[in-house]
Amino acid sequence: MEPIRNPKLADAIAEHLEQMILEGVLRPGEKLAAERELAEKLEVSRPSLREALEKLQKRGLIEITKTGTVVAQFMAMMTEPLAAMMQSNEQALIDYLEYRGLVEGEAARLAAIRATEVEMDAIETCLNRMRNAHKLDDPTAEAEADIDLHVLIYEAAHNVVLMHVMRAFSEMLHGGVFYSRLQLYTRPGVRDVLLEQHLAIGAAVLARNPDLAAEAATNHVRATAATLAEIREEQVRVARALRRMGRSEFVTH
């Protein structure tokens, strides 16, 4: 005979974990604690927890594998086809930067108003990471801190739609869908400007100055767009020059 389970308890557990995923506490790709440990943390029975996890799996929010339970990449159904279409598409880059120009300022404004002390500490820690990484010759660590800072601000805005959408775009950006961050960071003079801009955004959020935070974030996106346009124009000129140098292969003498 199967043990009697409380379906209401399983539903409550599933709802609690779903809320944690929605709020960004549990993030896509993260592995949950082992069943026994998770049951102890939630102070529930393992059968009830197992039933709750099965519910979440059916909703596409988690994946249960032989190695454990992982939060599903539930935004992938939207982002993967989008990434395939946008890869190396010049108009997609223009539209992406225009979209970020509309969103980043408001995200920073909301973060300056809504951020908790814990989130403020995380932003300050990230800014310190960025300062330290800036001293290194390799810009990789600084570029990673750049992404982390923007995600922290999205989270501190306390708008779950904004957070999930912009986090998905950040993952696409991290994968080089829109442009090469390394190319941006290795452009002469740009790295210093980016640090100054990021520190300005962070300082305004930490000072709880929403107008200044919005202005700093908007200016950052505009400056990035202008720099990327310059890079693209240079690439076009170089490609044109190379074609001219190789024209002899296409004509007879």
Image (cartoon, rainbow, N blue to C red):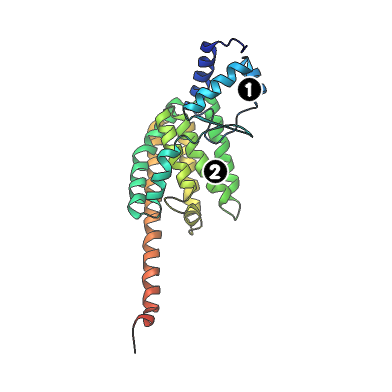
> Residue 212, position in %: x, y?
40, 35
Kind of residue indicated by mark 1: Leu
Q: Which residue is mark 1?
A: 38
Q: Which mark is residue 117?
A: none
Q: Residue at x 37, y 39 (%)?
A: 215
- If the image is split into quadrants, where does the C terminus sit? bottom left
Could you tell me residue 210's position as x and y percent?
A: 40, 31
- Mark with earlier residue (2, 1): 1
Viewer-proximal residue, 55 or 152? 55
- Horizontally, residue 68 falls left or right of residue 27, namely right
As drawn, is 81 to the left or to the right of 117? left
Is residue 21 in view? no
Q: Quadrant of residue 231?
A: bottom left
- Compared to residue 240, the image places residue 22 above or below, namely above
Q: Within 10 Å of the Cα at label 1, are there few (<14), some (14-19), or many (20+) other Cα atoms?
A: some
Q: Which mark is residue 145?
A: 2
Q: Could you tell me residue 43's position as x and y percent? A: 63, 14
Residue positioned 47% across, 48% down in the render: 194
Q: Secondary structure at mark 2?
A: helix
Residue in the image at 51% along x and 57% along y: 186
